[in-house]
Image: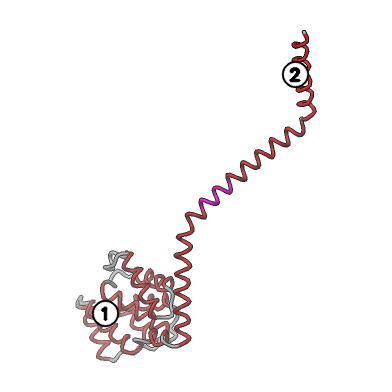
């Protein structure tokens, strides 16, 4: 699916990533990698997409892989609960028999969004808030600040890039010009005797005309 199909513009996805970066220890690049993975599941959209991305950071925070792999696991469960619930169960997310039956029944009757809501509620009830709690610790705050500093460096780099490109072009032009001057000087030096002879001959001709 594309960003638009999920109900978000590219700018909104970037804003979501920045927001999650500010409240978790994950960089916006890591979160956008998760978004890219989740976008491959066409049935995951709107508020469910937003909740799934937040849940992916929580699942990663409790040790269930990276944000990207957690997003992929959630995407599978939300796209096809009949198959995806097993993967969630394997990593420790539990569903009661009643929840499982209801999810499968809703999916079979075409009410996938309601089934997705139950899945997300179960995940959030078990790991929700973990990523934010870790980010609130002293170690977590240092990581949050490091991510923010990396963003600042990227912004400065992007702002400086046009100037750097211009300077590189100027440097290249100067080097080319200098090379041509050196080549010309080398040729002149190698032919200095001939040039001197021509100058002497020219001077002799001029003197001869004057004396003539």
User: Does the magenta stretch mainly form a helix, a strand or a loop?
Assistant: helix
Gap between marks 1 and 2, in whole Å? 97 Å
Is residue 180 toward the left or the right of residue 192 in the image? left
Residue 46 position in % (x across, y down): 26, 72
Residue 180 sits in which quadrant? Answer: top right
Residue 201 position in % (x across, y down): 78, 19
Residue 183 sits in which quadrant? Answer: top right
Residue 130 position in % (x across, y down): 38, 87
Q: Residue at x 41, y 72 (%)?
A: 28
Q: Quadrant of the N terminus?
A: bottom left
Residue 5 sits in which quadrant? Answer: bottom left
Please say if 159 is above or below 120: above
Q: Residue at x 78, y 12 (%)?
A: 208
Residue situated in front as seen by the camera: 203 or 28: 203
Mark yes or no: residue 139 visible. Answer: yes
Asked if the residue at tag 2 contacts the one at tag 1, i.e. Cβ–Cβ closer than 8 Å, the answer is: no
Name the residue that disc number 1 marks.
116
Q: What's drawn in magenta, residue-wise?
A: 165-172
Give residue 55's mark: none
Q: Quadrant of the C terminus?
A: top right
Name the residue that disc number 2 marks.
202
Please say if 206 is above or below 104: above
Q: Is residue 167 magenta?
A: yes
């Amino acid at each position: 699916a594309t960003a638009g199909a999920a109900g978000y513009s590219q700018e909104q996805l970037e804003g979501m990533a920045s927001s999650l970066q500010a409240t978790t220890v994950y960089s916006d690049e890591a979160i956008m990698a998760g978004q890219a993975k989740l976008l491959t599941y066409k049935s995951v959209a709107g508020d469910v997409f937003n909740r799934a991305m937040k849940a992916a950071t929580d699942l990663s925070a409790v040790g269930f892989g990276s944000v990207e792999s957690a997003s992929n696991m959630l995407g599978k469960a939300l796209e096809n609960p009949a198959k995806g619930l097993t993967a969630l169960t394997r990593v420790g997310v539990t569903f009661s028999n009643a929840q499982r039956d209801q999810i499968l029944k809703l999916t079979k009757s075409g009410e996938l969004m309601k089934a997705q809501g139950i899945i997300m509620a179960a995940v959030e009830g078990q790991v929700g808030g973990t990523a934010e709690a870790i980010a609130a610790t002293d170690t977590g705050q240092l990581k949050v600040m490091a991510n923010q500093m990396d963003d600042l460096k990227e912004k400065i780099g992007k702002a400086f890039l046009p100037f750097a490109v211009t300077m590189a072009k100027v440097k290249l032009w100067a080097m080319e010009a200098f090379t041509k001057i050196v080549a010309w000087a080398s040729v002149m030096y190698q032919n200095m005797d001939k040039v001197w002879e021509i100058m002497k001959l020219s001077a002799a001709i001029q003197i001869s005309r004057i004396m003539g």
